[in-house]
Image (cartoon, rainbow, N blue to C red):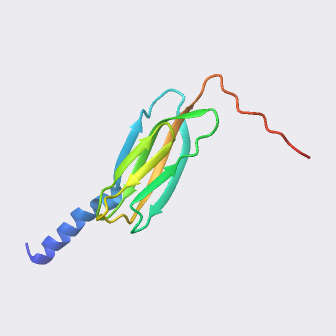
Amino acid sequence: MGFHSIYVLCLVVSAAHVVFGELWEFGKTNLPGSLKIVHKEGRMGLFEHTKKIKLPVPQCYVLTYVRVEVKNLISTPEVQFNINTNIVTIHYPTLSSSLSSFDIMGKGVWIPGCSPPARTYYG
């Protein structure tokens, strides 16, 4: 195996997680009555080492599952989900490359007995 073959093999192996991304899951995905209630996509810049993404949860729903996929050619971030504030935090250490994209999907269930406030129409 020549140098060129080894170089190509290393390039393919190191780039494999970019195609598939790194995945984090929080909560339980198969709860009865759960459905997809939020989806957010975005990017992080090269010098943006921490990003907090607020998930807009509809009234009368509660998140039960959050799936975060991050694609980055070089670095793997630390990903956290705060269930009390519905905020996903993606954090890269100072010397890591933070140039990446993310895809967040959340499932939730209806809160029993909850009814959203009536809308007032002015006309």
Residue that extends furthest to the right in the rendered view of this protein? 123
Q: Position of residue 95 (x, y in %)?
A: 28, 65
Residue at the left extreme, as displayed: 1
In the rendered image, residue 34, in percent from the top left (x then y), is placed at 52, 32
What is the x, y in percent for residue 65? 46, 37
Q: How many marks?
A: 0
Give the residue at x 71% y 32%.
116
Question: Residue drawn at (74%, 33%), measured in percent from left and top?
Answer: 117
Query: Which residue sits at x=22%, y=69%?
Result: 11
Image quarter hosting the N terminus: bottom left
Quarter where residue 44 is shown = bottom left
Image position of 96 (left or right of 89):
left
Question: Residue at left 54%, top 36%?
Answer: 35
Q: Is the residue 113 above or below the residue 41 in the image?
A: above
Quarter of the view holding residue 93: bottom left
User: Residue farthest to the top?
Assistant: 113
Residue 69 left/right relative to 106? left
Is 7 or 60 nearer to us in this picture? 60
- Percent x, y of residue 97: 32, 66
Q: Nearer the viewer, residue 30 or 91?
A: 91
Q: Vertically, is 38 above or below 10?
A: above
Vertical relation: 77 (above or below) 44 = above
In-front residue for pair 34/121: 121
- Which of 93/100 is in front? 93
